[in-house]
Image: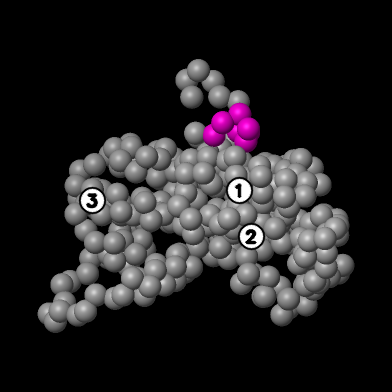
Amino acid sequence: MRGQFISNLRKHHHLSLERVARELGITRPTYVLIESGEREVNMTEAEKLCQLFGISLEEIRAGKTIEPAITVERQPQKESRKKAEKEALRISIPQKNIDKFRQVLIHILRKCGGKPNVGMTVLYKLLYFIDFDYYEKYEEQLMGLVYLKNTHGPTPYYFTDLIEELKSQGIIEEVKSKFYQYPQNKYLINPKIEPDLSILNGREIEHIEMELERLSDFTAKKLSELSHKDVPWISAEEGKPLDYEAVFYRTSDTSMREYSVED
């Protein structure tokens, strides 16, 4: 287990939770989630752990110490490394997060999927703001999805796979349409399907409802523009994951938390 491996490394080096959290640039509660296996490290954090503990990125990914190989192999080409990193990211999303994602997406589609403005791009941004706003307000993850930076804003990494799964199960139907002159992918929910919201607590449900009330009537263009003002998107590299910790550096344009003097 990767979290246990990182915990063992920290204890072996006689470092406190606060010290390692500070080195990673995250809060102590967030770091505790890493050691408990409830949160995966992003690439930047993994590289910092490698420097702190003197181990390789492969060992972080494997969650164990890797013995040196006897033979010397040719280093993979740049494109192969990128593909490997993407694949490693793909399998690192905890099942609990995917289960929450599934039910939240079904709930969103039941609540507002029929609105003329709600296509794939609007869904991307609704999911993003639900996740990142919750993290800013409570310093806890809701779905904890991985979002990548692209030209039109944050994109949830597992979205396409989940959509294909829901389509194959007859839970949703994909419809090609237009919103004004713009092409749009809409996802219509089977009216017989209800989300299982027991996987969420009361605060999470209340937060989701607030975000849908606040944002679900926005056009894709307006939501994209809003996401482009958000520090997690601004500070990320193109095609790379957005850092949840960046929400604590938000400006008044997107911040959802009332900060005290102590904060």
Foreground residue among 236 and 156: 236
Question: Between disc 2 and disc 3, whose residue precedes?
Answer: 3
Counting from the top left corner in percent of width and height, residue 13 is at: 19, 47
Q: Residue at x 62, y 65 (%)?
A: 159
Colour pattern of the rendering: one colour
* Label 1–label 3 contact, CB within 8 A: no
Foreground residue among 117 and 142: 117
| Distance of label 2 from label 3 (alpha carbons) | 33 Å
Q: Residue at x 77, y 64 (%)?
A: 184
Q: Residue at x 40, y 45 (%)?
A: 32
Counting from the top left corner in percent of width and height, residue 129 is at: 64, 46
Foreground residue among 234 and 103: 234
> Which amino acid type corresponds to the residue marked 2 in the rendered image?
Phe
Q: Which mark is residue 131?
A: 1
Query: Would residue 16 be found to the left or right of residue 80 on screen?
Result: left
Q: Which mark is residue 96?
A: none
Numbered disc 1: secondary structure: helix
Q: Which mark is residue 101?
A: 2
Q: Where does the magenta region start and end?
A: 250-257
| Distance of label 1 from label 3 (alpha carbons) | 29 Å
> Which amino acid type corresponds to the residue marked 1 in the rendered image?
Asp
Q: Which mark is residue 51?
A: 3
> Which amino acid type corresponds to the residue marked 3 in the rendered image?
Gln
Numbered disc 2: secondary structure: helix
The answer to whether 53 is drawn above or below residue 260 in the figure is below
Quarter containing the N terminus: bottom left
